[in-house]
Image (cartoon, rainbow, N blue to C red):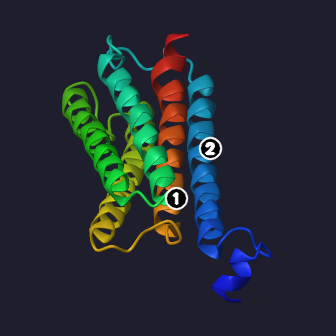
Amino acid sequence: MTAVTYAQGRFPRDPGWWGMLLLIATEAALFAVLLASYFYIRFRDAGPWPPEGMADPSLLVPALMTVLLTASSVPAYLADRSVRRGDVERLQLYLGATLVLGACFLGLQAWEYSDKAGLFRPQTNTYGSLFYTITGLHGMHVVVGLVLLAWVLAWSFAGRYGRDRHLAVEVTSLYWHFVHIAWLAVFLSLYLSPRL
């Protein structure tokens, strides 16, 4: 298969796009299993959930984290649209904005971990193990997303992308949207559902 075959519409999407979609589906299944385990254990536990003394009285930090990650999806989307129009300067601006917002999310997550260390750790109990495993896994996905964004941004300065060459931008943006959606599931499950 050649690039011409893809451009003619016989295969409307590049194999790289399908590969990213398959990776996202696999990672989504992983998060689904972890969240299902969380709810299974939560509803099997006879005591309060989270256990006494482990509940965070304020949702301020996780809510700020959610706002940051939700906001970061906007410039990721705009970066993809900009490169499709051949506007590399806006691509770089939007990629930079996505990187900054994602890094701020990670900074807040690190702060939250240091704050929670006084209340519980992964080895404290089942709740602590689940909390740190799920949020830590998501944090690792954010790190991978930031590395991809930085890589795409660096290559954009080297003139690698344009109106007809933008697959890396497209799949990186797709991955970043997945990271955002996965966080919404984590936020609703771990932070909001115990309060309902």
Q: Secondary structure at mark 2?
A: helix
Residue 84 marker: 1
Q: Is residue 81 left or right of residue 149?
A: right
Local packing at callout 2 (Cα closer than 10 Å; few below 14, some 14-19, many 20+) is some
Q: Position of residue 137 (x, y in %)?
A: 42, 49
Q: Mark 2 = which residue?
A: 32
CA gap, disc 2 and disc 1: 33 Å
Residue 22 marker: none
Q: Quadrant of residue 14?
A: bottom right
Q: Secondary structure at mark 1?
A: helix
Q: Is residue 172 left or right of residue 53?
A: right
Viewer-nearest of discs 2 and 1: 1
Residue furthest to the bottom in view is 1
Q: Nearer the viewer, residue 120 or 59?
A: 59
Q: Position of residue 174 (x, y in %)?
A: 54, 53
- Answer with mark 2 or mark 1, whichever residue precedes in sequence: 2
Residue furthest to the right in view is 10
Amino acid type at image mark 1: Arg
Please determine whether, in this image, residue 166 is positioned above or below residue 63.
below
Asked whether the beta carbons under mark 2 and mark 1 sit within 8 Å of each other, the answer is no
Please determine whether, in this image, residue 8 is positioned above or below residue 170.
below
